[in-house]
Image (cartoon, rainbow, N blue to C red):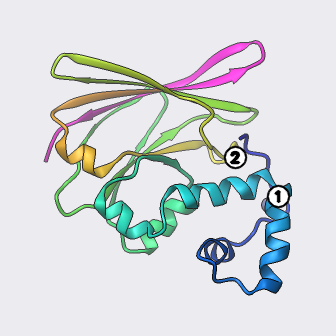
Amino acid sequence: MNGHACTAPIEFAALIAYWMGELPPAEEEPLEEHLLGCAHCAQRLAELVALGAAIRHAVRAGRLEAMISAPLLERMKKEGLRLREYRIPAGGSVNCTLRADEDGVVGRMQAALAGVKRLDVVQVTEARGEKISQRLEDIPFDPAAGEVLHFPSAAAMRKMPPTTIRMRLVAVEESGERALGEYTFVHTPS
Ligand SMILES: [Zn+2]
């Protein structure tokens, strides 16, 4: 999924109502038609669905890990979630933690995304001398946003020993791959 913009995006509230099955049929039909033809809004709905039926509960249970959009982050804050945010420039490094009274952490990786069609994340996690590498392909992003928001699982984070997480954003193009930036999170338990 790339980030093609939509000229008449479905309102967030309507998307949620649709997802909860609370839209009247007269509104549901045109909305469904729009979703079928609009990758942008379909992706927004997919983000909602990926976050589970009760955003607040799922986040508080700490089960979620996802790349999220800035509007969704704002929404979660409005829901009353206490989120620690780290804004980090390309090539930057940050010392991070999650306190007991917080619901989650968001890493806001700043990146020049204009013109990017497909975005992958290469993540290297290093703890207790052990290194694990994983690649997330074709992650959702907004080319105009200038950032990618990583929302790690709070439950996993609470159990984490001191850990260094390196995330590399990679633009995948016809001519090959282009590194957009590397972001280092040095995690310490609270
Ligand atoms: Zn749309």
| Amino acid, disc 1 | Leu
| Amino acid, disc 2 | Ala
Looking at the image, in which quadrant does ligand 1 appear?
bottom right
Residue 134 image point, x, y percent: 43, 24
* Residue at x-position 44% and y-position 70%: 54
What residue is shown with label 1? 36
Q: Secondary structure at mark 1?
A: helix
Q: Is residue 173 left or right of residue 185?
A: right
* Residue at x-position 39% and y-position 52%: 64
| As drawn, 31 above or below 6 | below
| As drawn, 75 above or below 161 | below
Q: Residue furthest top?
A: 175
Residue 141 image point, x, y percent: 63, 44
**Residue 174 part of the magenta-drawn span:** yes
- Residues drawn in magenta: 169-190
Q: Earlier in the sequence, mark 2 or mark 1?
A: 1
Please give the count of numbered marks on the rendered protein: 2
Residue 185 image point, x, y percent: 32, 33
What residue is shown with label 2? 144
